[in-house]
Image (spheres, rainbow, N blue to C red):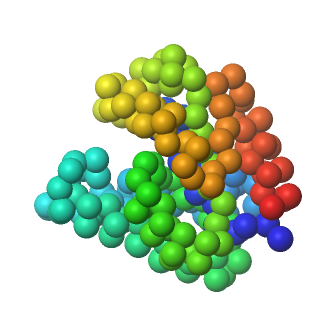
Amino acid sequence: MMNKIVIITGPPGSGKSTISQKLAERFSHGAVINVDKVRHMVKAGYVKPWVRSAKAQKQKMLGIKNACDLANNFSKLGFYVFIDDVITEKDSFELYKKLFENKMKVFLLLPLKDVLIKRDLSRNKEEIMGKRAIELWETFNYIKKEFEWDIIDSSYLSVNEVVDIINDKLKNS
């Protein structure tokens, strides 16, 4: 049985949004939840999720809870759900596991650092993360073995090749 809820994580520029979109398009019923967009529903009082504060932590967890509620609602109607989120902390991952009753599959897209930098610089000006993208790449590279994730080096793979790899792994899970 294929997992109906799939989380795609990785640093900015790794291809999370593109891959999530393409995966969802492969199914007759596919949905994408971009957790940043869920978090940005807060218009007044928004705190960036990487800020070290109680308010930022509460908002980060609220974003996960809201994304999981959406995903569970889609899944109950037979949709395959692809969640695009940057997960670098154990408590965030544990919350996903709890809210999905551990019935999800997680893929970490982690291209080589120089490839990530090049991709980040090729984004629209307002989307370039610069130093933050490198910091997150370093964080993911450090923590990657701590989690039960499938890791894909997407450096020299096309979007379709990455989608095929993930699709094959899902079919066999």
Report which quarter residue 124 is drawn in: top left
Q: Is residue 136 visible?
A: yes
- State the image coordinates of residue 114 (x, y, percent, origin top left): 51, 16
Q: Quadrant of the image for the N terminus?
A: bottom right
| Residue 25 coordinates in the image, percent (x, y) | 70, 54
Residue extending farthest to the front is 146
**Above or below for 170 versus 96:** above
In this rendering, the answer to whether 67 lies above or below 50 is: below
User: Observer-nearest residue: 45 or 54?
Assistant: 54
Seen from this angle, which residue lies furthest left?
45
For this view, does 54 lie left or right of residue 17?
A: left
State the quadrant of the C terminus.
Answer: bottom right
Q: How many marks?
A: 0
Query: As rendered, which of 157 and 136 lies closer to the eye?
Result: 136
Q: Residue at x 43, y 37 (%)?
A: 139
Looking at the image, can residue 18 be seen? no
Q: Quadrant of residue 18?
A: top right
Q: Position of residue 159 (x, y in %)?
A: 69, 35
Describe residue 165's horizontal placement relative to residue 80 as left or right.
right
Residue at point 34%, 66% (across, down): 61
Decide which of 36, 86 is in the foreground and name it: 86
Whole-percent x, y for residue 96 in the image: 50, 67
- As drawn, is 16 to the left or to the right of 76? left
Residue at coordinates 25% horizontally, 67% vertically from top-left? 58
Q: Residue furthest bottom?
A: 76
